[in-house]
Image (spheres, rainbow, N blue to C red):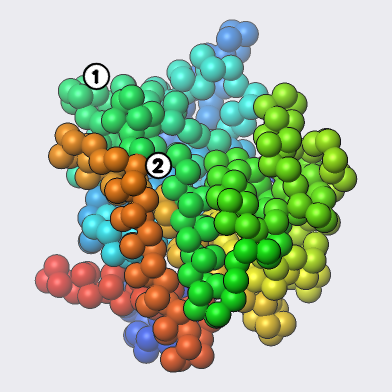
Amino acid sequence: MTSDTSIKKTHDAFFHTACSELDYKDDIFQLLLVANREIRLELPLRKDDGSLVVYNAYRVQHNNTRGPYKGGLRYHPCVTMEDARGLACLMSLKTSLMDIPLGGAKGGIDCDPSSLSDRELEKLTRKFTMKIHRNIGPNIDIPAPDIGTDARVMAWIQNEYSKIYGHTPAVVTGKPVVLGGSEGREEATGRGVSIIMQEYSRHNALSLAGKTAVIQGYGNVGSNTARILNSMGVHIIAVSDSRGGAFNPSGLDLEKVDANRRKYGTVAGTEETESIDNKTLLALVCDYLIPAALGHVIDETNAGEIRAGVIVEAANSPVTHEAHEILNDRGIHVLPDILVNAGGVVVSYFEWVQNLQQFSWPVETIQLRLQEKLQTAAKKVFTMVDAEKTTYRCAAYKVATERLKEAFFATGF
Ligand code: NAD
């Protein structure tokens, strides 16, 4: 993270703007802002070398008015309670904007997974599950993969949880297909990013094919976004990960990027590319800049240097409130996270439904239903942007907040 501001503060500022435009009184703003429950855990782990390390873990359950809490689980040294608070609120808005019957949560373990052996990671995950099992479950809170976690981690959680409650695939989403995971979940967030960019282009009478894109972060979201956009005719001119980037102004050969990553664990050094650092990458001239790694990578110190036409928030909260104002003044559109990266939670919802039905849908059905959900939400947001001359972020927040508030009051509060 490059900014001193927390993700929670960024989210609060955006939420405040949306609630002001909606003419909400301050008490309603506060009610919708505060999390229902915050869990802090200490996880002692005996490492392979015999040393004992205590890890901090968090889970913030923000709002379950519209359905069980839902949100990712991160394994990363940047995991804090404060950021989990902000990210959990974002999840409540995301599920509301998508109109799926789920709430919002977020959490993780403050650890560097790359410094842990597979055995240590599994042990830590099972410990976490043992400590939190009463607070998660198919009708309570359903974790999913996020930075530093994957299908394997979800499988360990499911397995540990099922030892207590019996076979319960619906306790997590994003698990392996052989254990009840959904077809299409792995690529869902990247596919969703591409669908929203298609809708944005359509709405603004632009063609997506032939445009250039720069992607920061080449994990689950970044790599799938690159692959799908490339198949739509977009030239991916630069990608990066935590160890550096690869740049070719004529367009990258993604097979070579993937091969380099498989061999050396990084995209940096891919043949026929120039090396580029993450700071320079963000300032490249391109049509679409797609941050797909950590939060707050665009703040007031570098917002003035951005030379992209549109910023597409594939990561959660990559742009601070101050940076958003600068970009807005410069006429650079920012497509917000709660719309852009919602494909993951939409297919997680489909996975949960399939698990509850004990029935699986073919990938074509998943992709079609994902497209319908995202197109419906995008249309609502884009129509509001045109009608009210507001930003894409504010419109998305307003649609989501109105739906959440309506549900909240319908409960009899
Ligand atoms: P991941 O762990 O699979 O990949 C993260 C990528 O970011 C890796 O390539 C890593 O090297 C890179 N990275 C880490 N630190 C970096 C740095 N300082 N500079 C540049 N790159 C860096 O994670 P992911 O699942 O792809 O998630 C990426 C973002 O998308 C996160 O903000 C996450 O919250 C968001 N998101 C993920 C999903 C999902 O389904 N996985 C859904 C919605 C939103």
Q: CA distance from mark 2 to mark 1?
A: 27 Å
Please, which residue is most extreme toward the left here?
Answer: 412
Query: Mark 2–mark 1 contact, CB under 8 Å?
Result: no
Q: Secondary structure at mark 2?
A: loop
Observer able to see residue 357:
yes
Q: Is residue 224 above or below residue 82?
A: above
Residue type at mark 1 is: Lys
Taking the image as shown, residue 16 lies to the left or right of residue 130, namely right
| Residue at (34, 46) in percent of width and height | 364
Q: Quadrant of residue 99?
A: bottom left
Please, which residue is most extreme toward the right here?
Answer: 274
Tell me, for residue 163, which label it has, or none: 1
> Label 2, on which residue?
184
| Residue at (52, 58) in percent of width and height | 194
* Label 1: how many Cα within 10 Å (few below 14, some 14–19, many 20+): few
Quadrant where ligand 1 appears: top right
Q: Is residue 188 above or below residue 47?
A: below
Percent x, y of residue 143: 36, 41
Q: Quadrant of residue 144?
A: top left
- In terms of sequence position, does the residue under pointer 2 or pointer 1 come before the other? 1
Tag nearer the camera, 2 or 1: 2
Percent x, y of residue 198: 52, 66
Q: Quadrant of residue 3?
A: bottom right
Q: Nearer the viewer, residue 169 or 90?
A: 169
Q: Nearer the viewer, residue 393 or 220?
A: 220
Label 2 CB, ligand 1: below 8 Å?
A: no
| Residue at (51, 14) in percent of width and height | 119
Q: Nearer the viewer, residue 215 or 234?
A: 234
Q: Secondary structure at mark 1?
A: helix
Residue type at mark 2 is: Gly
